Amino acid sequence: MRITALAGGVGGARFLRGLKAHLDVVAPESELTIIANTGDDISLFGLRVCPDIDTLLYTLGGGIDEAQGWGRADESTRVQGELAAYGAVPQWFTLGDLDLGTHIVRSQWLAQGLTASEVTGRLAARWGLPGRGIRLLPMTDVPVETHVVLDEGDGAGEKAVHFQEWWVRMRAEVPATRFVVAGLDRAAAAPGVLEALRSADVVVLPPSNPVVSIGIILGVPGVRDALRGSRAPVVGVSPLISGRPVRGHADACLSAIGVSSTASAVAELYADFLDGWLVDPADADVRVRGVETAVHPEPLLMTDVDAAARMAKSLLALADRVRG
Ligand code: GDP
Ligand code: CA
């Protein structure tokens, strides 16, 4: 079985780790291709940082800080302390010492002329992903950056900041009026991305942020069309339960694009290609035209790998059902 997934960071990585654990039991020969959001990428201190790819690498590779959901386990921040002593900015983005190793080697390889796909392939090899049937692809090799246009409400006109500054420093508390993704309209899908969507037996949308993770990947030219034309069932997991994101600020992102924060409104965003939608028992009344809904038999929460694996099992059962 060939499974292709679109993914952001923590929500995507935790779900896909559960999916992989489930597949290891029921279909160990399966191949999982992950198309990662790179709109969150940022250059800091001369280093290229790809937060969603790094979260996927560390989570699937067994190096993640479990409690936090991102960054390395047993991490220290001695380098960042030195940078602060020099007055170097920004200081709002945490860069752990082990994590910096990833950013340094990525930046070196990019400077040597490797593409983002090639670099991601090398990083994934270190974390043992290819040997376990997991292929990790950036959505595009072109640098793309999500910016957030802010409504500061003082008549001062529009101001845009990098997505990370809004998300991390401002904690998404300053209302956003829209997202502008620099470079996206000209960003060709990375090698293998469209092919992985076209040749999949199942396409899965983990409960990643519908606007700034999945929404960005859908904006890569050709991706949405490949999903619309897909023979395979496209099935997704709701990132919202009872009108609230499980973690993060998806509600602030949805309100910026004029969409309400409900499991059904998120499914509507995908309705042109979505076949099945897995929701929490609290959202059992969700109905979306043209989309088959399934209610997970327990809370739709990835409290641990097993819980995520059971979500994946429900999602694949739904895929079988819509396949007919
Ligand atoms: P990010 O890039 O690190 O923000 O991660 P993603 O975009 O991949 O995922 C973020 C989304 O995952 C948020 O909107 C959360 O609501 C959702 N999420 C996180 N944990 C859970 C969970 O346990 N269950 C469900 N249903 N959604 C979750
Ligand atoms: Ca992200």
Image: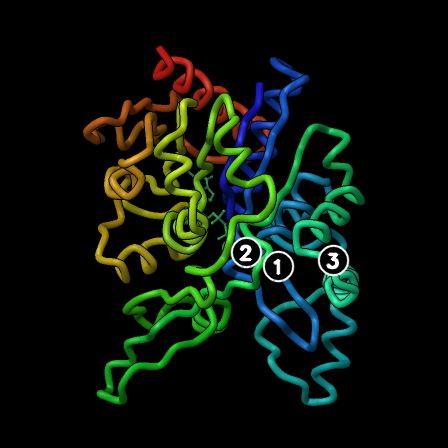
Please state if 29 lies on the left or on the right of 147 as rendered.
Answer: right
- Circle nearer the viewer, 2 or 3: 3
Q: Are marks 2 and 1 in contact (CB under 8 Å)?
A: yes
Left or right side of 158 for 88: right
Say if residue 47 shows up in the picture. yes
Tag 1 or tag 3, which sits nearer the N-term? 1
**Residue type beneath disc 2:** Thr
Q: Which residue is mark 2?
A: 38
Mark drawn on residue 50: 1
**In the image, is residue 37 above or below residue 295?**
below
Query: Horizontal and vertical percent for residue 50?
Result: 62, 59
- Identified at 62% across, 83% down, the residue is 89
Q: Are marks 2 and 3 in contact (CB under 8 Å)?
A: no
Query: How far is the residue under mark 2 from the one under mark 1?
Result: 6 Å
Write down the quadrant of residue 283 in the picture: top left
Q: Residue furthest top?
A: 324
